[in-house]
């Protein structure tokens, strides 16, 4: 019998996964797996993980029988793909589960930012007043939305934004001209996008080429007064550059569902791991949520089902949703 283990199991997830697996048996761990936190058993052939795990050469060496890593996420930056390939280990992910889910949350953050909705609610609750002084926002209609990354999520953001009457400028390392024609937008350079967008939204995976894609070298290219939304990965947006742009008025606001070093913060539950977070939290024009964009019942159901499909397809000799190093 194939030996399988699930790591980073969340409350209620074990029962749901077991139900979907049927007669397939597996071990379940609430903790992540990494080089400093290895399971007692070393003969697992399939492991399923989440973002807090870290699969590197040390983990691969410690699990000599490993044949498949399936991450219950779209992102796979927690896995060393090159080392996995060298070890003969396949990697699968959940390529689509919440493109609509994350896109809706992205627009929700934008609306909260543009219309100062959290501040409006807090004014009524905390000040016990019912006036709108200091809460003037801006309309989305007619504004230019700069979409960085036009994959599944970016595409749905564009569709929703066009419903608000927004103009679209897009940047992607691999432009999809058919998509651009179908949805009625144009691709441009990153520099032009930063120069001309009223709102910038990030939807790229975390790769060496996208780490600090927005940084101290190009943050000054952003049009003064722009707002930025990040629901991709925290490391795509350099925090030092973000703070600089906010302090200097280059950016008039930011809405973040992800932050740099959030894995360390989630493990420690202490903000000392990321002192710059305190500075962002003190800014009235910054909204931060705890990597919550994916979090709907429908999305979680699809994540689990796709993960089980990945495992069953592998066991049947027909692996699906494979990820390979670029």
Image (cartoon, grey):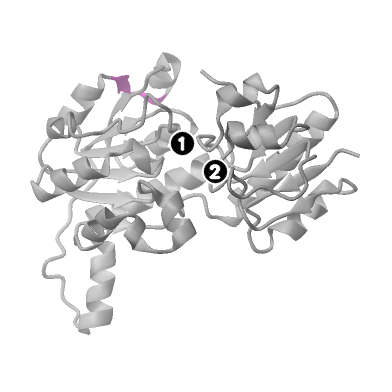
Quarter location, residue 274: bottom left
What's the distance in space between the residues labelled 1 and 2, CA to CA? 8 Å
Q: Of helix, strand and loop, which one carries label 2?
A: loop
Indicate the quadrant containing the N terminus: top left, top right, bottom left or bottom right. top right
**CB under 8 Å between callouts 1 and 2?**
yes
Q: Is residue 110 left or right of residue 3?
A: left
Q: Is residue 14 rendered magenta in the image?
A: no
What is the x, y in percent for residue 196? Answer: 16, 29
- Picture coordinates of residue 173, whole percent (x, y): 37, 19
Which one is nearer the viewer's eye here, 275 or 128?
275
* Extreme residue in the top direction: 177
Q: Which residue is mark 2?
A: 98
Residue 165 sits above or below residue 246 on the image: above
Label 1 residue SS: helix
Q: Is residue 94 visible?
A: no
Left or right: where does residue 63 sit relative to residue 277? Answer: right
Location of residue 81 (image quadrant): top right
Q: Who's the residue at 81% across and 49% down the image? A: 26
Q: Residue at position x 28%, y 65% from top? A: 118
Is residue 185 found inside the magenta-colored segment of the image? Answer: yes
Tell which residue pokes out farthest to the bottom in this image: 128
Q: Looking at the image, is mark 1 or mark 2 earlier in the sequence?
A: 2
> Callout 1: few (<14), some (14-19), or many (20+) C-alpha neighbours within 10 Å?
many
Against 172, is 250 above or below? below
Q: Which residue is mark 1?
A: 153
x 23%, y 53%: residue = 114
Q: Is residue 45 above or below residue 30?
A: above
Name the side, left or right, on which 278 lies relative to 225.
right
Magenta-highlighted residues: 183-187
């Amino acid at each position: 019998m194939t030996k399988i283990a699930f790591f980073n199991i969340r409350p209620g997830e074990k029962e749901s996964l077991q139900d979907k697996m049927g007669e397939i048996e597996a071990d379940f761990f609430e903790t992540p797996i990494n080089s400093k936190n290895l399971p007692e058993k070393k003969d697992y052939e399939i492991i399923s993980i989440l973002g807090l795990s870290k699969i590197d050469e040390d983990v691969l060496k410690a699990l000599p029988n490993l044949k498949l890593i399936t991450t219950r996420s779209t992102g796979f930056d927690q896995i060393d793909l090159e080392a996995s390939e060298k070890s003969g280990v396949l990697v699968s992910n959940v390529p689509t589960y919440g493109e609509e889910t994350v896109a809706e949350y992205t627009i929700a953050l934008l609306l909260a930012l543009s219309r100062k909705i959290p501040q409006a609610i807090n004014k009524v609750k905390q000040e016990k007043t019912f006036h709108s002084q200091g809460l003037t926002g801006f309309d989305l209609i007619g504004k230019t939305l700069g979409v960085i990354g036009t994959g599944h999520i970016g595409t749905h953001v564009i569709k929703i934004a066009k419903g608000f009457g927004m103009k679209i400028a897009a940047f992607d390392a691999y432009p999809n001209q058919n998509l651009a024609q179908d949805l009625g937008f144009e691709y441009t350079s990153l520099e032009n996008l930063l120069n001309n967008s009223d709102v910038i939204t990030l939807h790229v995976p975390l790769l060496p080429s996208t780490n600090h894609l927005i940084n101290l070298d190009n943050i000054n290219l952003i049009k003064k007064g722009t707002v930025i939304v990040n629901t991709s990965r925290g490391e795509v947006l350099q925090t030092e550059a973000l703070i600089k742009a906010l302090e200097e008025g280059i950016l008039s606001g930011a809405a973040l569902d992800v932050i740099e070093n959030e894995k360390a913060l989630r493990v420690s539950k202490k903000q000392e791991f990321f002192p710059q977070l305190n500075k962002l939290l003190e800014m009235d024009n910054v909204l931060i949520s705890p990597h919550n964009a994916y979090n709907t019942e429908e999305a979680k159901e699809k994540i689990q089902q796709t993960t089980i499909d990945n495992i069953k397809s592998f066991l049947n000799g027909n692996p699906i949703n494979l990820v390979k190093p670029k």
